[in-house]
Amino acid sequence: MSEKRLEKKSLNSPDETRKFDYGKLEVVTLGGFKFGRGTFQPGWKWSTSIKPIAKTDSCQIHHIGYMISGSMEVTLNDGTKDTFNPGDSFNVPVGHDAQVIGNTPVVYLEFLGAAEFAKGK
């Protein structure tokens, strides 16, 4: 449970930065809650950039977030696909792959999932 105090942190000076091939996740903790900003460059794909860190066949993190820039295609384990673009809010369940589409870096805010994303087991 969060403390009853006013807090402010900037993602420009994150508490933690997790770097990986073609990207990074910057994380701040407020009231015990981890919030993140992901930046993925063209060429980023979960199965090549994060799978070696996660050591799972597909992403096992539930993500809820908001796209700021770029386009990302997500493919669920059952084959369902969707593309997320700037202005889209998203809910991606456990069991998926994802990749940057096009030449614009993906920048998104992560409300759920930042605590564990891109952390080794």
Image (spheres, rainbow, N blue to C red):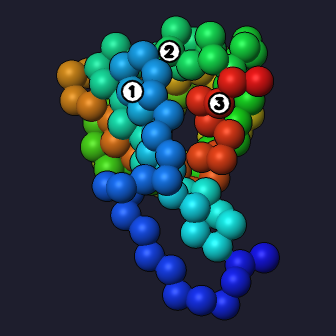
Image position, residue 4 (x, y; %): 66, 90
Q: Within 10 angstroms of label 2, few (less than 14), some, or many (20 or more) residues?
A: some
The mark found on residue 119 in the picture is: 3
Q: Is residue 105 left or right of residue 120?
A: left
In the image, residue 113 sits, relative to residue 23, either above or below, namely below
State the SS at label 2. helix
Task: Tell me the residue at 70%/83% (across/down).
Answer: 3
Instruction: Bin the neighbour count of mark 3 within 10 Å (Cα to Cα): few under 14, some 14-19, many 20 and up.
Output: few
| Quadrant of the image occupied by residue 81 | top right
Q: Which residue is mark 1?
A: 23
Displayed quadrant of residue 53: top right
Amino acid at dot 3: Lys
N-term mark: 2 or 3:
2
Farthest residue, direction left: 103
Q: Is residue 6 above or below residue 43?
A: below
Q: Position of residue 2 (x, y in %)?
A: 71, 78
Percent coordinates x, y for residue 76 in the rendering: 66, 25
On residue 49, the disc is 2
Screen quadrant of the N terminus: bottom right
